[in-house]
Each structure stands twice: as C-alpha cells, then as structure tokens.
Amino acid sequence: MRGGEKVLEVLCELLPESDLYTLIHLPGSTAPIIENRRVFASWLNRLPCVGHYYRYLLPLMPWTAGRMKLRGYDLVVAVSHCVAHGVGVEPGVRFVCYCNTPMRYAWGTLNSYFPGRHRVDPRRWLLRRLGSRLRTWDVRAAQRVTEYVANSHNVQRRIAASYGRDSTVVYPPVDTDYYLPSKERPDSFYLWVGALAPYKRIDLALEAFRRLDRRLVVVGQGQCLRMARRNAPANVSFLGRQPDEVLRRHFSVCRALIFPGEEDFGIVPVEAQACGRPVIAFGRGGALETVVDVDKAGSGAEPTGVLFHEPTADSLVEAIRRFERVEQEFQPQAIRAYALRFSRQRCKEALSDCLFGARQERSAC
C-alpha cells in the first residue's frame, strides 16, 4: 500500500465504526481492515475497467468529490493528496484533513509527473488549461476544512503557501516492527525502490551508475519502467514489483538505498533505515526530515545517510563516492534507532491526540 492507504489503515483502527467514502474502490487493493469497511464509492467507480485509466479522470474529480454529500456525521476525516478534502459536509461538522500534499497537478511542475519531457503530451496540455481552475477550486475546498494535519514539515509549509492555513504535523506510519535489520552481512549492491514515475528521478540513478562500477538493483514498476529498462546500463537490474518479504530482505542487505527524487515525506528511506541501512538521498523535501546527513550529524544524532543538493547525476555520483569514503561511520543500530521516531505506534498516538482525545464521535473517513 502507498502512504495514504497506510494512514487510512491507522484511522480505521482509531475509528472502528466509521464509514468510508472514496472516488474509486478497487476491491482487494488495500488492507483487510479497509476492505471490511462499509464503502461508498462515487459514480466513477461504475466505469468499466476504471482501475486502468483513473488518472485520466482528473478533470472530473473535483466536481465528483463535491457531489459526495456526507450527512449524519459529527466528524469527517479526509486523507487527501488531490480532491478528498472537497467532499460536501454539513454546516458545523468538524472536518479534519490529513494532507499528504496540496494537489500536485494544480501546484506542482507538470514535467515532474509525465515522462518524455520533450514530447508533445495531451495530458500536459490539458492540465495547463485546467491549472488555474484547479487551483481556484482547491483553495475554495480548503476553506471548508476545520483542521489540517500535514504529513511533514515540508507539506506544512506547502499548506500555508497554497491555502493560507496552519496545520499540525503527524508523520505517516512506518512499520518498524516488520522492517528489521538482518543478521546477514550487507551485500555490495545499491538499491532503488519505488514507483517508476518521472518525479522519482530513476533517470538520475541510471546515469550515475552508468559512470560507476557498482551494481544497482531496482524494485518497483510504473509508467517509466519501459524507458528505464531501455536506457539502463548493464550493471543495473530490474526486479519489478516484489512482495514485502522480498523488499525487506533487499532493504536489510543492500549497501545503501539510492533515493534521488523529491518527496512530500517519503516512507521508503525510513523503511530502509528501520532495517539499519544508510540512505543516499536528494537533499530536498521530506528527506531533510528523515535522513541525518553524515556532515550534519552531532548533538546526539548519529548519521543515517548522505544528502546531495543538485538534481544531477554528477551530484549523485559525488554523494555515492562521499558515502564510500565514510561508510564505516554508519552504525546499523543507530540508523534504526533514528527510524523508530517514525513508527506506526507514534503515528497512531499522534493522530488520536489530533482527532478526538477523550471524545468518541460518529465519523466518516
């Protein structure tokens, strides 16, 4: 599951009698505690094979979310990265939004989300035409939310810039009980994990390892997989999507995780650190909150990785070489200890404090 679904799973535990509203529900795609909930899906869910093309329905999503009227609840919680905070709630209802990011398609750079930057892409053209309308709708919807919870300080700043709203930071849950250090000796390969989307910058990793005599293992799939395979040097191997147990083993025995994209928070680097392995990450976005750079460690914080600060292959190559010069400074138990501050239990306790404290309310999420 992705970060938003992991937050939703915790919310289902905190609000066991809640109903679940969603634009699209693909049965079997989430955890049992979510699947067993009473689910109300929008009319988009009735479109044939919608799971294959739902991203293209973005222009319809704000209008569809606004037509979902949630009545009879004292508390509504939206887990939003796009339009979930735009649902209709009754006047006076407490409406809390856990925001993974303000709508990327309205506020972000389109080149970050579509491959083929020099190719004519009708999706990019359409979103440019819709951009100002999406932003206007997004700001209007944000004003109906009574309280914002941000998934990082990075997103907290975006909420303030986009919506002019304050928010409380609650980091998303990382299953540090599942992701554990291995008794095996670390292998020699570097690891890249994630959905192969343009903003994840697999292109930087491929170009960097083209210049290095090192092995890179790529776990994941997505819209850039075909292009990545075509452009990869011989020292890069692709495993596709893997089950959690395979991913855990790769985390625990890799030399280091390569994380060259800018994320809102980024759960993958924390999962690797929970397994005791260091991270080489682009020093922007969520990585600034989840990775302690070897040059900035001190005051009780042990290093957990190396940050590079230019989104170029040259900068990543230098970071890898810098990591290898100081590799002995990284201690697996210290790295894991830092990751524990992002544990699932901490997330659950913080969300509980934000939502209701001692109160229990009839709720929807």
Image (cartoon, helix red, strand yellow):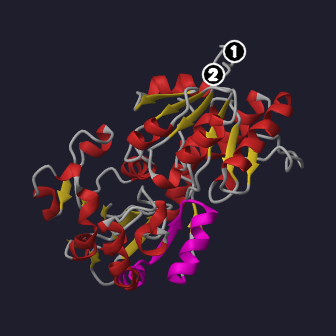
Nearer the observer, 343 or 273: 273
Q: Return the residue at label 1.
A: 185
Q: What amino acid is found at the position of numbered circle 1 in the picture?
A: Arg
Q: In x, y percent, where is residue 213?
A: 69, 27
**Mark 1 nearby-residue class (10 Å; few <14, some 14–19, many ≥20):** few
Q: Position of residue 261 (x, y in %)?
A: 58, 52
Amino acid on which the number 2 mark rests in the picture: Val
Marks 1 and 2 sit apart, C-alpha to C-alpha, by 7 Å
Residue at (53% x, 45% y) in the render: 202
- CB contact under 8 Å: marks 1 and 2: yes
Quadrant in which residue 230 is drawn: top left
Q: Quadrant of residue 275?
A: top right
Q: Please indicate, yes or no, whether residue 100 appears anywhere in the rendered image.
A: no
Q: How many marks?
A: 2
Say whether residue 94 is left or right of residue 64: right
Q: Position of residue 113 (x, y in %)?
A: 43, 60
Q: Mark 2 = which residue?
A: 253
